């Protein structure tokens, strides 16, 4: 293996000449591994007793909770600080000028955001309580509320979305997207943290669901596997405009349906059938389904 | 970070007021992490030499096997016991009154089930041998049987289904669903442990496949990515009825096909084409495919 | 738990009688866990500073790189050697007679391949630079190049494909398939390592994408979630023939489209609409989309 | 390896017949591993920034400290509770009737003790500050105070003694002894937690030092390696009486000296020379040394 | 750090020229780390419930024990096999021609030895029961038998000696010495595995105790810290002869005493005082102590 | 556990008021844990194949060595840099003005020192080869050279001394002392890194050996357990002077001997008997031993 030293030199040279690509020697990006650990910790904080072995009771609940809060807070502040510093260095304008910290101010800005986040946690738990009940009600196969918490990837994806959305809302770069891709990886459900989703949202099975950045979803909406809420136009210039549909309250969208466009509004109470392809708005309380036109041949081999 | 103590209090209060949601201080649920370790261990027991580094030979096969059996048995008993105790506490009636242990009896009941499970393992291996051969035969890209074992997610999903189904059949709550969601997370294939699936079953590629709780599948069935075997009705009251289709022997279902309904029967030897949408039964030896009606415009930019 | 010793005996007996299935006591297969660690290490080598916590600067970049190269090289050689030895034992003919090492020669052959691989790495980085820029340009939601590297599963899947394809090209068995299934598991994108893919390739969202073994893809191609580039015939006898389509330069294929067949050519500059089903060739600069034929009922409940 | 099942049976039988020895199925003893982790954590709490990699600053000191306190408190309470329950079960009378909790009260008693312990920590840090300065002053080889903290085993042994003594004083069984043996193992210094040691105590080199249960040591005492402060009588009936010497303020005891007996008092300001053997008291400001009577032979080989 | 490649070459060259020292490319020696894990496992097997967190009860004792036995047996066989192969390669004659396996036979020989070892374990536990009771009886500071098991390094050293001696007796090279040095490292007690030690042996405090290879110790012997039972002659030619003393039943040896010589016999019932230096035999029931001749100066500073 | 927040405040306050003791917020000290990992890595580099499981052969020796060198070099540079920066901040004058880096220069100075260290390693291996042979020759109980490497704590202590002495010689603060205390902890042998020790040095058994900062030891010296080479004066003002003895070539010092004083010279070829107490020089080829004056009483109980 003596020949490798030449390869090492070539690689180092490649790092130099493709400097833009690599990040060496510069402000550190938030770490995917840390974000993963933070999400895991938040799961334990939100559903104490569900995600780990240690048995909780009234004697240790307070100290376990306090320990977790301090630990997660510290990790979050560090990652948020790195994200803000990254924005600053790359002159990535935030949408509203929020978080426009000079490099010394990034830590203080991060602390503020994380403090707000923990303030918000009890409300987040109430939202998730509603999501959980929506899942239980919406799936005849669910035998208990606990089953939803320990085994429904759609519920987990909504939880991560709600966490990621908080940081998106505060215009923290990168972290919300890393969060949404972590759950995309494990649940196959791709909800952009920029989407706005109401109460009691349920995704069943969920693999292949895509919900775009500017989607707006009302209350009591139910979505099945393979549903896309996407954009018609994918031109870079469109960035910033509303490119994804609006789904009003009490809508159900069956598996494989595709709804596209920023002006497309699915009215309250609609049912969108499986595999439907929609690029225009639908009035409230409408049912849309595909007329299948299928050929049938008998007596053939598969 | 002094401000966090207020957040901690609020979170503790939220645990109190949303007591139903949380599990603190009560019977422990089975642990997702333990179930994951058990599945990993069973994979090594079922395919010794395939899943780990340690090299096996005739001198150590017996002791490695014995060690694994005792280790997994103990973990399984603990998790099954927790599941049974959970049912008991929540007055979740088991389908047939099986496992109706009082709280002292849950350990004994768990031991019985796990003993049966290990008795069953050699037969499970025979089933998986057939599944493996079906995968090899069904995919021209497969170069060897070993390739199926080490790299086919569809095969892995069927293995986990067969394990989970054993516990479903014994009416152990939660564990089968945790198992099926673990493989759903990693393979994107969602087979409910309640489904009944015959011999030599093969899922190719597999991402997005959904097979519902009351599905019945015969022998020599082949299914591609994105296939849904689902329910027409998703009302909670339907829980317990047969809501998902029946697929007879020797059927092939191509990618993206959707077959719905508890009375829908796909007869022996049928071929269901890609993206087909079916809510009614199909006679044996029929070929069903979508007539695509597509527009073509020339000279446009992409 | 005294009863388990009978189960252990039965399992050992089952290992004996189903000897073909199991691998005990024979040449070791490459380990999935090692391949996973190798892929992780290569990710750090290709994008130094992006995948881990340790901060890099000009003082330690050389030594970190050298350490990684030596470490990964050693693991890769071991796994490649096991793969070649496996082929040899199973009389699996390589396509071109490459790597036809006798059992003593497998180590030397493996060293050669791994040396070539590290020689190739800088060129691979250039390819990935183009892929990254294609992703950034192709997605209005992408705010920075760094966001692509840390959070786009489509980009990660292309990276793993390019690594796996190197080993496929050198006719190393099993390893390329294990690599492609590892990323299939985490990204839901199934690219066979045998496919040939040009520059600036971008997969958006990606869950459910399937790209078959003999697919050929040109430059600047963009593909959305749920796209299948598959085979019409799935007979074992077809193995070795071109069974999957050819996609020429500058083609965009929207979500859920299915393109099948080894003779199917999608000409340069085409746009294939969502859910399109294609089994025949399309001339250059053509736009193909599905005419949706949908029923609408008003005033119904979902 | 089939023969092992007989050995397993024999071992299980041996567990049955030597029931007193084993602990299976009974109240759990405090875990050596947990006590080790607690000591490690306390080291980080007492000397923040000295024992670990993570860099501390004014922005994270509070949250790291809070997290550590809650974590260590919880572990300590669990171990103290197990210790008290062990006493109760074994009818081991505590010296003064303290901690005489019924089995339900052990948790509350443990909480009280641990709360007191954390109250005491700042005072313990003041004591250790004095010990550290005594070490620095007492050893010409010490270049800085920091060197004492990071590398003096004698200082570490005194720290562990002061922690263990707190729990001894509260009549917590087992834990103080486990603590003292952990540092005995790593530093070779055996200080019984029952000893009473004043301010500014320094042990140099330390290997082989033994300080017995009822030893009393004043302020500003310095002790070298191999010194024994032991008992004359080792009869079980003596348990409870003062069996070990008293060392008054400002005494120095050189290496290998042995001082025995509960009535032996080394007066203020004494110097005890190396290898001296003392079983009787020495008046203040006395210097005791051994008259060495040695033979010398010239011209011999070693 | 470019300059390191020269150092690497020099180091590789040094490996070549000092070939005898290094072990690269040859039969593997037993691994210190594996032996350490084996000792830890045996501790848990011998005192179930004392050394780990997992709570044992009658429902899991059997399976935990069986798992441990199979696991430790496999590790032990591997290490013993490596030791025997090492002897073979180095033509190190075993004392009695035992274990004279050809290289193919080393595995079988190792299996035999390990089987015998597990047969012997219940008897070893009986011996340790006696040692434990001797410790409890011999130390007024011991409050319970459990305290001896969890916190007496002298007891732990005797346990490791008894395990190591088994393998010494079977003429397994290296492993017994690695075992004895592991406990020497943690307890400061150096008992050569070749020594022969009777029942009810107790070492108090223990730091600095040395017991040589050919020492013979009777029943009910008690030894304090710093005691040496050593050789007069340290010439290589003496290897194999009895070089260390014989201690008969019921002897107590106080701290720092040194007893040397293979012909030196300390008769039954003797008491050897602290710091005594003995190179000749002592009749039974004798008490030997040093007449201390000490100078005392008053009024001096320390 | 609500009461702990008060304890946390008190602890934080204590950190503030005892600022000198604590290190928070300042230049990081070298980490004991990192130094431990470095020593472990150097052990593997110096004796490849002895310290770990991985089997080495001619195909992987180069890449393993290169990987280790780069890894250890990077860690060492980081720790040395921290040590130099610590000196700088604390105005601790180095003995000769070496390493007087400004804070920006500490990294470069550290790189230089570590480069020199790796240059020196082959010579260090030659020294250790001689030490190993001295141990083998000096102990009749040693059966092979390999036994010395894997199980002699005295040999390990000399290895660590030689490594630590390199850094002491380069006037790197703290690190050499941390190294010497790590081996002191595990072997009970306390060799100050400032001592100067010649070739072929052997410490047998070793527990309790102390060798002071300004000791000078010639070639072929052998030392037994409990030997002290110490200072007569322990006044802080003496720091910097020669306070510890000189031992010339070919001297043997038996267990428990104490030799004190910077002017004390033990001439070439001397033998110093067990427990001898020396504060004056001894002419070459002299044998010194203690005349033991012991009382013997018969017929007494122990």
Image (tube, coloured by chain):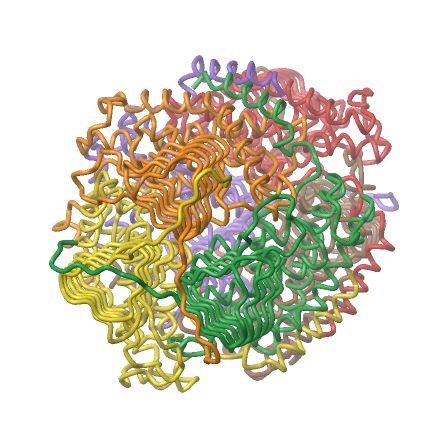
Chain colours: A red, B purple, C brown, D orange, E yellow, F green
Numbered circles on residues, count: 0
How far across and down, in percent of the image, does residue E160 sit? 31, 60
Q: Is residue D163 visible?
A: no
Q: Residue furthest front?
A: E298
Q: Left of A154 or right of it: where is B248?
A: left
- Residue at the (27%, 29%) spot, across then down: D84
- On-image quarter of the N terminus of chain A: bottom right
Q: Quadrant of residue D242?
A: top left
- Is A202 situated left or right of E180 in this image? right
| Residue under the point 37% across and 69% down | E175
Residue C142 in view? yes
In the rendered image, the vertical position of residue D89 relative to residue C245, given as above or below: above
Camera-side residue of A27 and D157 = D157
Give the residue at x 43% y 14%.
Answer: B16
F143 is higher (above) or lower (below) than B109: below
Horizontal side of residue E217 vs C244, given as left or right: left
- Residue A107 image-quadrant placement: top right
Residue E299: % across, % down: 46, 37
Task: Indicate left or right for D56 with F96 as reference.
Answer: left
Q: Position of residue D176 (x, y in %)?
A: 35, 36
Where residue C249 appears, as percent x and y from the top left, is: 83, 54
Q: Nearer the viewer, residue F54 or F225?
A: F225
- The foreground one among D232 and F29 is D232
């Amino acid at each position: 293996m003596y020949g490798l030293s030449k390869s090492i030199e070539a690689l180092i040279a490649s790092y130099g000449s493709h400097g833009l690509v690599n990040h060496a020697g510069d402000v550190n990006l938030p770490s995917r591994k840390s974000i993963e650990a933070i999400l895991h910790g938040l799961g334990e904080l939100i559903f104490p007793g569900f995600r780990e072995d240690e048995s909780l009771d009234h004697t240790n609940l307070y100290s376990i909770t306090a320990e977790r809060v301090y630990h997660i807070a510290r990790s979050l502040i560090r990652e948020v600080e790195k994200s803000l510093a990254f924005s600053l260095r790359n002159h990535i304008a935030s949408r509203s000028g929020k978080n426009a910290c000079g490099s010394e101010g990034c830590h203080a800005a991060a602390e503020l955001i994380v403090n707000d986040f923990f303030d918000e946690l009890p409300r987040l738990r109430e939202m998730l309580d509603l999501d959980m009940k929506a899942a239980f009600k919406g799936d005849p196969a669910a035998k208990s509320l606990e089953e939803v918490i320990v085994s429904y990837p759609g519920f987990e994806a909504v939880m991560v979305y709600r966490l990621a959305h908080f940081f998106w809302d505060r215009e923290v770069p990168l972290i919300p997207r890393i969060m949404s891709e972590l759950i995309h990886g494990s649940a196959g459900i791709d909800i952009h943290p920029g989407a706005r989703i109401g109460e009691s949202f349920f995704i069943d099975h969920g693999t292949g669901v895509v919900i775009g950045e500017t989607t707006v979803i009302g209350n009591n909406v139910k979505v099945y596997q393979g549903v896309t809420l996407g954009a018609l136009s994918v031109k870079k210039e469109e960035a910033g405009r509303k490119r994804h549909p609006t789904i009003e309250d009490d809508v159900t969208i069956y598996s494989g349906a595709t709804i596209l466009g920023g002006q497309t509004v699915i009215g309250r109470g609609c049912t969108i059938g499986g595999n439907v392809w929609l690029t225009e708005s639908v009035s409230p309380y409408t049912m849309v389904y595909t007329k299948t036109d299928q050929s049938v041949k008998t007596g053939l081999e598969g």
